[in-house]
Image: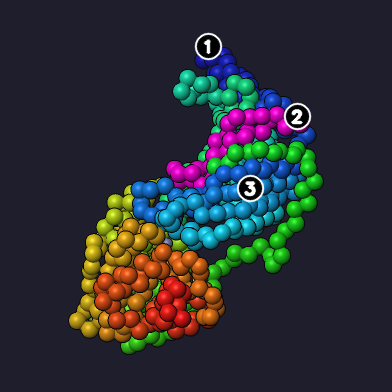
Amino acid sequence: MFRKGLAAFILTTLLSWTAMAQDARTVISNASKALGAENLATIEFSGSGEDFALGQAPNPSAPWPRFINKTYTRTIDFNVPASRMSRIRMQGENPPRGGGLQPVIGEQTQNQVIVVNANTPWAQQLEIWMTPYGFLKAAATNNATVKEQTINRRKYNVVSFTGQNKAPVSAYINEQNLIDRVETRIDNPMLGDMLFEAVYSEYKDFGGVKFPTRILQRQGGYPVLQLTVTDVKPNAPANIQAPQGGAGGGAPAAATSEKLADGIYLILGGYASIAIDFKDYIVVLEGPQSEARASAIIAEAKRLIPNKPIRYVVNTHHHFDHSSGLPTFVAEGATIVTHQINKPYFERIFSAPRTIAPDKMSQSKRKPKFETVNDKKVLTDGNHIVEIHHLRGSGHNDGFLVAYLPKQKILFEADGYNPPPQPNAPAPNPASPYTLNLLENIERLKLDVDRIIAVHAPADNRRIGMAEVMRMAGKGN
Ligand SMILES: [Zn+2]
């Protein structure tokens, strides 16, 4: 009896396993037929809409800021595989609010080409594999599984395969065999295992291929792209060429440094930071960009100022390019000094799962520590003085901070004034409201500024004084 029962159990398990595998193949095949994806080698779709700059919100509870896409065209070659996007962008937030290189003056052309090779990051490839057709092609060759799920009384076949980053990529296929949604997770230095969703609706027929005329992409819970598609060309010649100059990316530049004054060092080689030699510890201004950049800054600070711990890292604002090194400083044991509006946000996102790319913070098991700033805070050891001031009324960020060293008359700032590569570049017209606001705050706070250290340091590392900022703000000559 027992033996017979076991055999029956194994047989049933095997049967249902085979049935399941067949089901995934059947579901993929039915969806491919319904979408007209079976003989689709390339697709070009165009329309208009909006894009949104991830991590560049004006405050931690606002969505990503918006830019108008007057035109948008994407061509995908599923066989290479490769993708080419080109669009004309315009300022979307009026008045400017948040980051992402606002304000865009006039029309800006943006191009992006991805030709997938062994080194192409998975997150970039998702522009191909998260389209309905790309998903079906990837699922068909990656041991996809299927399960049934009912959401809001609608029945779905949810097909999943494992992405190169080990996170599942799942498509919600409706009863018409059309894909309503594709979702996965990608690693983000701030948000951890970040949700990436693509929502497809209002499918229409374009020469035998059904294509969604509404596309919505969300990352980290907010839209990053919203498109109304007006034209689709199935199997149009794609001819996507890899961009010149290699794959790019690679290891970040090594940190270099310059002594600004006794015990005060400017660290370059990426976004600029300053390391200050306090009596018993090191204070670092800004923990930007990435774990790699933060690690380079930390190593350089410790080389310049040996045998002292990094006690504080001062954060100018929560924009991801200025904060993505903060978790690395947490792993180092440093306390984050930031505007008070950021504390609950950082606490929440820094405790989110970080399983896709476990970072030094999650490995260290250290919890972030904060000291917050409202209007002003002073860090001092009796010798060095670092005044941290809130920039009132900036559209760039509601919790915008600058650091001022009164003895050395140095102002450390981010995104209030971003110096152009050339010192004699023409002033933007109209002047950036963020630069005008920086000048208003310098005046209000009566800061006597001799030298400005911009986090977005110019490549020539020229000395930037108030005259340059005034000229670029359209004041004086
Ligand atoms: Zn910013």
The CA span between labels 3 and 1 is 67 Å
Q: Amino acid at mark 2?
A: Gly
Number of marks present in the image shown: 3
Q: Quadrant of residue 130?
A: top right
Q: SS class of the residue under badge 3?
A: strand
Q: Position of residue 299 (x, y in %)?
A: 42, 74
Decide if residue 142 is on the left or right side of residue 104: right
Q: Residue furthest front?
A: 476
Q: Which circle, 3 or 1, is nearer the viewer? A: 3
Q: Which circle, 3 or 2, is nearer the viewer? A: 3
Question: Which residue: 44% across, 53% down?
Answer: 94
For ligand 1, the image quadrant comes to bottom left
Q: Nearer the viewer, residue 124 or 198?
A: 198
- Extent of the magenta region: 198-225
Question: Which residue: 31% across, 83% down?
Answer: 409
Q: Is residue 195 above or below residue 368?
A: above
Read off the residue under disc 3: 72
Q: What secondary structure is the stretch in magenta mostly built from? A: strand
Q: Is residue 316 magenta?
A: no
Whether residue 176 can be seen here: yes
Q: Which color mode does the image show?
A: rainbow
Q: Amino acid at mark 3?
A: Tyr
Read off the residue under disc 2: 208
Q: SS class of the residue under badge 2?
A: loop
Q: Which circle, 2 or 1, is nearer the viewer? A: 2
Q: Is residue 453 above or below residue 436?
A: below
Decide if residue 213 is on the left or right side of residue 238: left
Read off the residue under disc 1: 1
Q: Position of residue 398 (x, y in %)?
A: 33, 57
Estimate how packed mark 1 is, as few (under 14), some (14 to 19) or many (20 or more) residues with alpha carbons within 10 Å.
few
Q: Amino acid at mark 1?
A: Met
